[in-house]
Image (cartoon, rainbow, N blue to C red):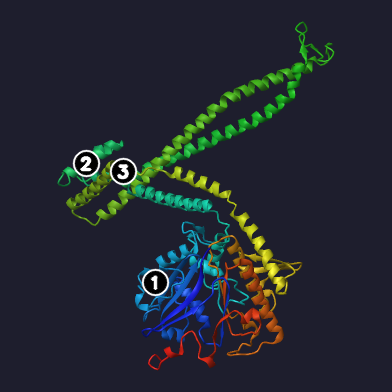
Amino acid sequence: MTFQIRAVTIYGKQPSQVHTVPFKPGGLNIVTGDSRRGKSALLTIIDYCLASSEYPVKSGKVRDYVGTYAITLVKPGQQLFVARRAPEAKKSVSTVMCVLSQAPGSPPPPLDDLRFVTPREVAKDILSDFCGIDRNIRVPAVGRATLIAPSVRHALFFCFQAQNEVANEDVLFHSQGKEWRPNTIRGVIPYFLGATDREQALLRSRLRLARKDLSDHEAKLAAARVLAPAAGQAQALLTEAIEARLVRPDTSRETTAEGVLRLLRQPLLQRGPQAGPDSTDDPISDLRNRRTGLRSHANRARARIADLKTTLAENGDFTDQANEQRARLATLGLLKRDPTYPYGAHCPVCAGPVTPAHVTAAALAMELEHLQSDLHAIGRDTPAIERMISEEEGQLQEIRSRLARNQEEINEVTAAFRALDHEPDDARRAAIVQGRISLYLDTAAQLAIGPRVEDRTEELRIRIAELETLLSEDTQGDRLTSFLSLINQEIRSKAQELELEHSSSMLRLDVNRLTVVADTPDGAIPLKDMGSGDNHLGYHVATLLSLHEWFAENGNPVPGVLILDQPSQVYFPPDHVGEEVLESDDRILLLNIFKAIHRTLRRLDGRLQVIVMEHADLEDPAFSDHVEHRWRRRDGQALVPAAWITSEAD
C-alpha cells in the first residue's frame, strides 16, 4: 500500500509558531471556508514538500508569515515526516529538505529539532521508495530519445486537481498545461497503470546502453582513424624532404611503406639541407600527371567491366531463351529411332513406323543438339566472364586507392609548399620539414605501441538487433489497451450516475490526447466539446476516481490521495468571494459529485483518501459529516493563525 496524508504543518517565522492541519486517512476530508483563508495553499504546500523543483505557494499571507512547511505521510506501520523551508531571499526554491522516519502517531517535531540536510533529489528518491515506485524502471519518453525514471513527482499527475484544473475543458491531469508535461504524462501512464513489464523495461535499458556503447565505440574508431597517419602522407613528406634537400632525389622511386619510413628517418639525423643545386622538378605537376594517368586507367577499367557485364547479361538472356526452346524440343525423346532406317522412327504408342515425319524429326533433333552444344559452351564461358569481372573490379578498386593516396599527397605537398613560401631561408624550410616528419614518425610510433581499438561494431550491432527482436514481442501495448478498456467501463458507469452529457455513448480515456472522448454516431467528441462546466467537472471526477480505483485494486505505486480544489466553482458566479447559497439544481449536482466520491471510498475501504477544499458548506450529511475544518472570516479561522499576522511582519 502506498502513502496518504495525516497532516499539513506550517512553522511561522517567529519562535514557537506552529499550526497543524490534521486529516483522516482513508476517507473524505473537506476544508471549507471563505476565499483567501489559505485553502488552496494546502495543495501547493503538499506539492512543495513532495520535492517540487519549483515554489508553487502563491503570494499572500502564507508566503509572508510562514518560514517552513511540512507534511506527515502515513501507510500501514510507517510514518514519514517531510519538512522544507521557504526559499530564502533572492532564491527561487530551497534545495535541501528534512526527511524523518517516525513512529506511527508521532506529532510534528519542534522546528529546532529539524535538520535540513537532505538534497532535494535524494528526498525525491526517498519519497518514491515510500510510495512503492521501482526506481530501477526506465520508460521511454514520448517525443524525445531519452528514458524517464518514474518518481513520486510523476505520480502526482493523477493525485492533484488545482483550482484551475478541476473543471478545465483543456487539461485533464495536474500540470498538463505546462511545457513538456503532456509528453511526460504520456510516457509514465503505462507504468503507473501496471502495463510496463519489469523485464521489458530492463531490456529497454540494456538496449539504450548498447546503443550508447555503439555510439561511443564508433567515436573511438573515428578518433583512431583521425590519429592514424594518412596513406599518402608519408610519400608527401618524402617529396617535401627531397625538395628541402634533406633526402637525395633518386630515392623518390621507393614505394614500400617500410622503405618510405626508413628514408624519412634520415632527415632527422641532419643539421640542415644538403649542399647541391636546387631541384628544378615540380612535384605537384608530377603528382597531377600521375593522377591523370590513374584516371585513364580507371576509365578503361570501368569500360571493360561494363562490356563484360553486358556480355554476361546477353549470355543470360540467350540461356533463358535456349532453355525454353530445349524444353519444347525435348518431346522428341518420345520417338524411338530405328537403327536400320536412317531417318525412321517408331510411334511411342503403337511402335509402328512413322515414315512421313522422319525429315522433320531429324531436323528438330539436330536443332536440339545445336542448342545443347551452345548451352554447354555458354556454361563454360559464364564463370570465366564472372572471374574476369571480379579481377577488373579488384584492379579498379586498387586504382581508386592509388587515386586517394595521390590526392592526399597533392594536399600535403600543396599545404607544405604554401607554408614554406613564407620562409626564404633554406635552413628554416628544412627545419620545418624535419619537424613535420618528426611529428609523423611519433604518431606512427604511438599507434604501433599503443593499444589498438578493436572494431566491435558488428558485435554491438548484433546485440542491438537481438534486443530489438526481443522488444518487438513486447505486450505492453496490448496490456495498456486491455487495462484502459476496463477503466473506461468505470468512467462510463460513473458518468451515467452523474447524469453527464454523452454518458450513454462509449467513453474512453485517450492517453495520446490526454482527455476523455465520447464515441458517438456523429464522431468522436472530446471533453472540451462536451457542453457546460458541470460536465467538465463530472468527467474529471469520474476519470480520476476510476483511475484511483484501478491503482488501489492492483497495488500500483500512486499515492492513495486525491485532492480537489473547489469543485463547486462551476456553480458559483465568477465574482463570488464569500458565502452564498447554491440554487437547488446546482446543489443537487454538487452533492452528486460527493456521493460519487463516497461510493469509491466505500469500494476501496480505506485505500483512498480524498481531500476537498471548498467554498460551499452544504447541510447534507454527504458533505457536512466530513467537514474537518471551517475557515470563516467571521470566526478568524484560517491556515495562517490571526495571531501570526502582526504589524511588524506587515
Q: Is residue 239 above or below residue 208?
A: above
**Quarter-of-image position of residue 255:** top left
Q: Earlier in the sequence, mark 1 or mark 3?
A: 1
Instruction: Give the secondary structure at mark 1.
Output: strand
x 68%, y 74%: residue: 529
Q: Position of residue 129 (x, y in %)?
A: 46, 62
- Asked if the residue at tag 1 contacts the one at tag 2, i.e. Cβ–Cβ closer than 8 Å, the answer is no
| x then y, percent, for residue 31 | 55, 81
Which tag, 2 or 1, sits closer to the chain's start?
A: 1
In the image, 75: left or right of 650? right
Q: Residue at x 41, y 49 (%)?
A: 218
Q: Residue furthest top?
A: 340
Q: Secondary structure at mark 2?
A: helix
Which residue is denoted by mark 2 in the rendering? 265
* Residue holding disc 1: 97
Relative side of 637 to 288, left or right: right
- Residue with the mark numbered 3: 451
Real-space Cα distance between discs 1 and 3?
Answer: 48 Å
- The residue type indicated by label 1 comes to Met
